[in-house]
Image (cartoon, rainbow, N blue to C red):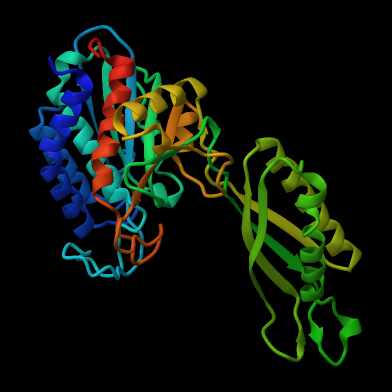
Amino acid sequence: MMDMREKVKKLTEENMPEVVQWRRHLHRCPELSFEEFDTADFIAEKLTAMGYEVKRNVGGTGVTAALESGKPGPAIAFRADMDALPILEETGLPFESERAGIMHACGHDGHMAILLGTAQLAAQLKDAYCGTIKFIFQPGEEANGGAKCVIHDGALKNPPVEGIFGLHMIPELPAGTIGIKAGYLSATDDEFVIRVRGKGAHSSEPESGVNAIVIASHIITAMDSILSHNVNPFDVAALSICQISGGDAINVIPDSVEMKGMLRCIEKADKERIRERMNQIAQHTALALGGDCEVEFIPGFPSVNNDPALTKITIEAAKAVLDSEDDIYIIERPHMGSEDFAYYQEEVPGVMFMLGCGQEETVTGTLHSANLNINEKSLSYGIRIFVMTALALCGGER
C-alpha cells in the first residue's frame, strides 16, 4: 500500500503541469500592492473550481478559502503574498510580464502557485485531514500593510488559527533545498526622518546664520557611534542614513536639512535604545550648534520570529520531501531584510522558511532585480512541504 509521503509526491507530480501554468499566468500579469484585482479574480476562480467557498476583498484585494474536514482538530493557515514590484522586467522569458514597468521580481508568483497547488492537493486528500486548513492570499506585502489589513478583516478567526506557515523564494539556494531557523529570522525595518533647522544667511555673513548642513554633518558623525556603544556585540542592528537634502544656492547659508534612512534591528529592546540615542544626539547636537532638530520614526515590519515547536514540525516535513537531510540548511543568524509575515506571528505561532529556487544552468538573478528567474522545480518542493506540514498537524493518516 502506498504510504502518505509517496501519495503526496505522486499527486504533486501529476498536478505540476497545471501549477506551472498558474505560475506563468501570474508572472505575465503582475499587479502592484492593493491593486491585485485580476490576480484575485484568477485565484478565486481556481479555488472555486477546486470546490472551495471563497472569501473576497479580505484586507483589500485578498482572497481566502478553508478546507473544513468536518472532524474535530486544530485550525492552521498557509499564506502567500500577491503583489508585484514597479520594475521593468529584463528576463526575456516567453511568459515575461505583459505590463510594462511591473514585475514579479520577489517570487510572489511562485508563492501563489505553491499555495494554489497546496489547496488543490489538500482537497484531493481531504479525507486524510481533521480540523481546518486555511489558505490566505494576501495583498500588499511590499506596501507595509497587507498582513495587518488581512488580520484586521478576520483571516485568523472563525475558527481561531493556532499556527500559520509561509515561505519565501530564495535564489541563493538551489531548488530542492530550504533554509530555516527557530527564533528570529529577519529584522525590523523602521524608516526615520531627521529634520535639522538652522538660520539662513548670506554666505558673506556666516556669523549671522546657523548652517544646517554643518549641524547635520555633526549629527551623522555622532550617530555613527550608536551601534558600537549601545548595542550588545552579539546582537545585530544596522543604522543607515541614505538621503540628505538641504541648501538651494551656493551663496546662501541653508536654514534646513532633511535626512532619511533606515533602522534595522532584531531585538525590540535594541530598537528602543537606538531610537532614544538618536533623539538625544540629534537634539543636543543641534542645540549646541545654535539650531534645533526633530526625529520622526515611521514603523515598519516587526521581526519574523519562528516558533521553535512549529519549526521542528516543518523541518520533519522537509525531511520527508527533500532528497537528503543535507538539503536543509539551518540558518545561523537572522538576515536584515524584513517581511510582513511577522504581523501574523504577533497574533499566533508561526513559521516562515526560505525555499531554494536557484537555477541549475542559467542565471537566476536576485530578489527585486529585473532578471529574477526562479527555478520552477522549486514549486513542487514547496507544495509538498506545506502538505506534509498540514498532515503532521491535522492529519489522521500518515
Q: Is residue 191 left or right of residue 44?
A: right
The answer to whether residue 357 is above or below residue 193 is: above
Q: Nearer the viewer, residue 105 or 257?
A: 105
Tell me where residue 152 sits by quadrant.
Answer: top left
Residue furthest out toward the left: 49
Q: Residue at x 33, y 13 (%)?
A: 74
The answer to whether residue 97 is above or below residue 158 is: below
Q: Residue at x 44, y 30 (%)?
A: 351
The answer to whether residue 84 is above or below residue 220 is: above
Q: Tell me the quarter of the image containing the N terminus.
A: top left
Q: Residue at x 32, y 34 (%)?
A: 322
Q: Is residue 199 left or right of residue 78?
A: right
Q: Nearer the viewer, residue 6 or 278?
A: 6
Q: In the rendering, at what x and y percent does residue 305 appear?
A: 53, 32
Q: Nearer the viewer, residue 202 or 257?
A: 257
Tell me where residue 350 sits by quadrant.
Answer: top left
Tell me where residue 115 sits by quadrant.
Answer: top left
Q: Tell me the quarter of the image containing the C terminus.
A: top left
Q: Is residue 168 left or right of residue 272?
A: left
Whether residue 122 is visible here, answered yes or no, is no
Residue furthest out toward the top: 72
Q: Nearer the viewer, residue 186 or 270?
A: 186
Q: In the rendering, at what x and y percent does residue 159 appear?
A: 32, 17
Q: In the rendering, at what x and y percent does residue 245 appear?
A: 65, 74
Q: In the rendering, at what x and y percent does residue 162 appear?
A: 40, 18
Q: Residue at x 81, y 84 (%)?
A: 201
Whether residue 393 is visible here, answered yes or no, is yes
Q: Is residue 59 left or right of residue 223?
A: left
